[in-house]
Image: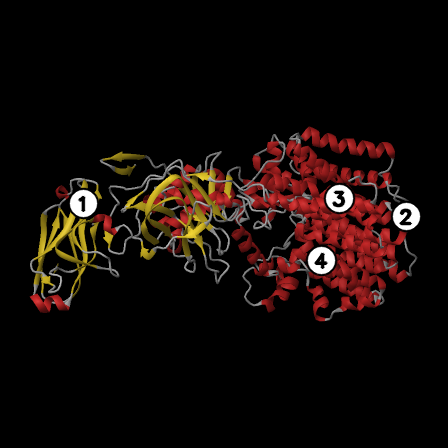
Amino acid sequence: MPLTTPESAIRAGFLLLAILPLCACEHWPESYAAPMQRPVFDDPDRWERIVRMTDVDAQEHFVADVFDPLSGTWCWTGKRPLLRLQVPEHTRRTYFMDFAIPQQTLKSIGPVTLTFLVNGHALDSRPYTAAGEYTFEKDVPPEWITGGDTTLGAEIDKTYVEQQSGRAYGFLLVSLGLTRN
Amino acid sequence: MTALAPLIGAFLTIVATYALGSLFLARLRITLLCAEKAPLAFVSGAALLHLLVFVILTLHVAYVSVLAGMLFAILAAALWTGHGSLPARTDIPKSTSLIRTIHIVFAAIATTFTVVYIFCAWAPEISPDGTAYHLPLIARYLHAHGFEAVPTNFYSTLSEGIEMIFLPAYAIAQALLTQHSDISTLAGAGSAAALVHLAFLIALALAIRAYGYRVGNALAGEAAALLVYLSPVAGVVGTSAYVDLGAAAAVFCTFYFVELWDKTRDHAFLACIGLLAGYCYAAKYTAALMAIYALGYVLWRARSWRPVFVVAACAAIMAAPWLLKDWIYVHNPIAPFANQVFRNPYIHPDVERLWREVVRSYAVADRSTLPWMAFVSGGVLQNPLGPVFLLVLLVPLALLALRKPQGRRVLLPAVLLLLSYPANIQTRFLLPALPFLSFALALALEDLPLLLVVLIAVHATASWPRNLRRYASPDAWVLRRTPIRGALRQQSENSYLSEVPNYRIARFIEQTVPPGEKILATSSFADFYTAREMLVRFGGAHNDDLMDVLYSAWHTPSRPSLATVLRFPARAAQRLRVVETAVMPKADELWSIHELRFFLAGKEIPRSPAWRLRAFPNPWGVGYAFDHSPVTRWRTWETAAPGNFVDVDFGPPSRIDQVNIETSGDNPDVRLQLEEMDAAGHWAPVISQTEQLTLSPETSLPLAANYELRARGVRYLLVRDNEPGADVYAKDPASWNFSVAGHAEGVTIYKVEGVTIYKADGVNVYK
């Protein structure tokens, strides 16, 4: 388009203006590769491991007697629920369990006793005579924590057996783990 | 020499600028009156000189020898041709003895203020924006001998037409002071730039005065010039390394040339109009409205496209370099605006939105207080125009000028220029319109010369630094004294500057942080006086990402705290994407993903190098959702909208039965849908069970943030004692693996210590 007249020059100018926004289109990257994976930071002196039943990965920690599907913020256990955690060895930590004993259970089977377990060791036993929400915390002897997989749990002395399914129910587990002491 | 260097640098630049303009006007065979030649030649010369400096920076030959050589060559040419001289004074209007007395009074007031202004500009530079970015960018270009991309400071994307004129003055002053301390050198170079800016203010006042002469309203012209010149906002901004008076001068001179063309219809003026209209854009984006005025006015009056095209072509010569520079460096020709049109990885649209929101209101809840701040107290609008301008508001005297044709001529551009004011309500954004309003005001009172004298006397009294202290708010930025000892360097630069808190912080940074280190901070502190690179929040996308990393580690709404789990029957999928489907109720609601994970039978599928990731918007940040870091996240960085997506192409089909979308609590209105691409290339929804879960807080987030900062080369963090998060870092710096490098002036500098990762018994540990 020769710019011999002002009109053609103006047309050329408008054409250039029209092209200008196209520079917005040219920098789209097609796609990216997955980036380098970052390390997970687990400071042996700072970590704590609490598995809450609401955690997205909670089921990955279940070993035995924790019933799914998850319901709300808790789940039913059987007689001896166990969870597995990865922890550094010989660190000082506190056993922590948040749980509830329903009225219905106590009504059926009477007062219960819970024994709190760490790697098969009995940390403590406590009787519970009333329904309600409880928290149990107690320091764990460092030598019980051997590194790698650590199993935490609790054992209830009596269970409530549902007539229809024959399933034995213990208590309601909310969270379980090791905290800093 | 420390006192003389800035004067020498500024003088050479100012004279060469005038000389270049004179040569240009002579080349066009334009004849001007004596009163108008100096300002019009200076501003025209600035437009041309800015282009020459632009070319020098583009060629990366910005050495002082080249810059000084250019100035001397211009001066030699002007001397050789004799075009630099002023024409004979034939424009002195005949007047009565009363009017002559008024002229003398006005001249005395102007001279007094000029002396004050020279000392203020000559003193070491302390202005907020001057030391935050105008001067640091010049220093950076000179250090690199040319332009360089500064993606961590979006102010570098603004057009820098006035800074280009500062640059030779700065370089010469700096070269003359190389034997002195770094502070003396910086302060001297900064003063040279401020003196050049003062030249623009003087040129503006002279142009207004000359316009009065030209149109036969000499007294109105002089009064209008003084209304602008004495205004507290013009006084403090014009004596600092800012650009607003340069822009205002370019605007008024564009108008002036339009008027000359309209009167003479000499085509030579069209080139002047175009070049200056383009220079308005180069000086300051908001001044570009004057180009619209010029083009519109020329079209209206000429009723022909040919002169419009000439004006547009000349304007393009001035504006195009800045459009191209931004296009090349940040992929957005009008950066830092329109980032949703010209998408780029350097400036987040949400930060642009936030910035625009801030400058539209400056957190002033009661808008009725704005006029008082703009005219009298300054307050958060920084500087007052001066109480006499209340007349414009309370008694719209300027509108009386509508009765006169000349009044209508000046009010038209004033109205147009005021259109941009709501976009940034700081008082200095009124400066481009101020000459026109002042002229209209003076015109309305011209028939009452004694009243005009009273008005100017009141204005001068109210604008005098000692008096300003009495009524301007304490946080207003105004001239409060005449720093004679500081200007003459009888008071050391360090002592003078130490009165400014931001300077003290800048020197604290300089002493605490080793050379070559970068510092992450939430606000800037007189960056000009530290050689360390500051990465300031909202300065650029990189800085925002870094700050987001920190916030993700402590700020509850930003932490990864929620997971949307989508479960579906196992399927072999090659390409899946998560799509946002809801319209956000608030503009500040962004969608973010800390991690996007895929599972089969409860086990996460490891990310493979074969995966290809895509996202819209912000495709550049998609990797943050796949890096296994809990403190990085892909964000839309603009209001989430239906159709936003994150897309994963697995390469070979992968069996999947669960997708976890880990996110924070700050995007509650986002609604997501999982889609799979079918064999035909169409996206189809995946029917899935959705669960919303809460993630347990990770105690290692601070260490993860530390790792990310170090990975990006940031080893220092500067925190104001009163800023959000300051208490978090101060309470337990060890949990972040930060050490306190220093605390002074209400800020703490943390050193981001290294984090070494190694595996022990299958567990990551650090030391």
Can you name the residue that lies furthest to the bottom here?
B395
Q: Residues within 10 Å of mark 3 (few under 14, many from 20)?
A: some
Q: Position of residue A155 (x, y in %)?
A: 10, 54
Judged by depth in the image, the label closer to the viewer, 3 or 2, is 3
Mark 1 or mark 3, which has the lower sequence index?
Answer: 3
Q: Chain of mark 1?
A: A
Residue corresponding to mark 4:
B417
Judged by depth in the image, the label closer to the viewer, 2 or 4, is 4
Tell me which residue sits at (21%, 46%) in the image.
Answer: A85
User: Circle 1 sits in a helix, a strand or a loop, which is it?
Assistant: loop
Q: Residue B89, labelled with which disc?
A: 2
Q: Position of residue B430 (x, y in %)?
A: 68, 58
Residue corresponding to mark 1:
A92
Q: Residues within 10 Å of mark 2 (few under 14, many from 20)?
A: few
| Amino acid bearing label 1 | Arg
Q: Residue B672, labelled with which disc?
A: none
Residues at marks 1 and 3 on the same chain:
yes
Tell me which residue sits at (77%, 48%) in the image.
Answer: B203
How much space separates mark 1 and mark 4, taking CA atoms? 70 Å
Q: Nearer the viewer, residue A172 or B721?
A: A172
Asked if residue B522 shows in the view, the reply is yes
Q: Residues within 10 Å of mark 4 (few under 14, many from 20)?
A: many
Classify residue B88 by image quadrant.
Answer: top right
User: Circle 4 sits in a helix, a strand or a loop, which is it?
Assistant: helix
Judged by depth in the image, the label closer to the viewer, 2 or 1, is 1
| Amino acid bearing label 4 | Leu
Q: Chain of mark 3?
A: A
How much space separates mark 1 and mark 3, taking CA atoms? 78 Å
How much space separates mark 4 and mark 3, taking CA atoms? 29 Å
Residues at marks 1 and 4 on the same chain:
no
Asked if residue B39 shows in the view, the reply is no
User: Circle 3 sits in a helix, a strand or a loop, which is it?
Assistant: helix
